[in-house]
Amino acid sequence: SVRSVDFWLKLQPDVETGTIIGWGNAASTGGEFVIDLEDGKIRVRSGTSKIISTNKVNNSLWHHVMFSWNGPLLTDGDLFIDGRLDSTASESGNVTVNTAAGRPLFIGGDNNTAPDRLNGIVDEIRLWSATTSLAELYERFDRELEPADEPDILAYWRFEPDSTPSTYVDKVGSFNLTASDGEFVRPGAPLTLALFEVAGNGQSAVLKTNFSFVSANGATKGAGYAMKQMR
């Protein structure tokens, strides 16, 4: 289905690989949708199709990433880095995306083994049921949102003070994250309000619905808290 995903990301130069977010079932062609890293660059993939950013993002700075897709092919989507369309991103494959059920959403790693885990910080994760225009991206990428004002938002983890080391609240209301062993640290993504992040120890976490959250030294934060993952 039509979708947009956006988040903030901060990586050290030695981080070249790791899963950021994804869902679906790889058992069927085009059944899985994943955003991860390849050689320090953002990669969006489904089956044998992939889009890879022109530049690396592992430079110890915060970067905003957004992927907007209206299908049917994965390569029909647009990748934005720091508010700009990556018009020279490499594209390959002609897989039609048809995200399959039967596998939970994951953040920071698609299983509990170290090779898939992200060693970095991810913050302000937002899932949308519509494409995102450049004007919409500029309007909302650097600020907290009120879900009631965003009819197309599906899930939004911003890690405000109503979150705790064991529960990270989805501000839309359906997909709270249940985690273990976290602590609050500063700072988080460069939004316009006070920032924090939540540091984790690489434990897995599960949403109270049919999604699951796998963390490994990354961070999920909004203008409130984030979670740091480590391998």
Image (tube, rainbow, N blue to C red):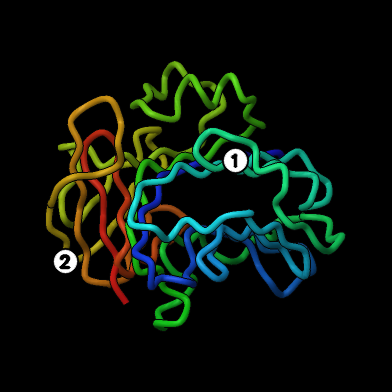
Compared across the picture, whether 45 is left or right of 30 comes to left
Asked whether 208 or 16 is in front, the reply is 16
Whole-Å distance between the Cαs marked 1 and 2? 33 Å
Q: Amino acid at mark 1?
A: Phe
Q: Mark 1 and 2 residues: CB-CB less than 8 Å, in contact? A: no
Image coordinates of residue 108 in percent, x first then y, are 41, 64
Q: In the image, residue 50 lies at what x, y percent?
A: 72, 62
Instruction: Name the residue located 74 percent from the left edge and 57 percent from the top edge.
Output: 90
Q: Dot 1 lies on which element?
A: strand
Which residue: 61% across, 43% down? 67
Q: Residues within 10 Å of mark 1 (few under 14, many from 20)?
A: many
Relative vertical location of residue 29 with respect to residue 126 in this rendering, above or below: below
**Residue situated furthest right in the rendering:** 94
Of pointers 1 and 2, the one earlier in the residue sequence: 1
Which residue appears at 57% of the width and 69% of the height? 38
Q: Nearer the viewer, mark 1 or mark 2?
A: 1
231, 52: nearer the viewer: 52
- Say which quadrant the C terminus sits in: bottom left
Vertical placement of residue 193 versus 19, above or below: above
Q: How many marks?
A: 2
Where is residue 87 drawn, in percent x and y? Answer: 72, 42
Of 93 and 70, nearer the camera is 93
Q: Is residue 110 found left or right of 182 in the rendered image? A: right
Quarter of the image that includes the N terminus: top right
- Helix, strand or loop for disc 2: loop
On screen, 202 above or below 35?
below
On the image, the x and y values in percent for residue 136 come to: 56, 21
According to the picture, the residue beneath numbered tag 2 turns out to be 181
Q: Which residue is mark 1?
A: 80
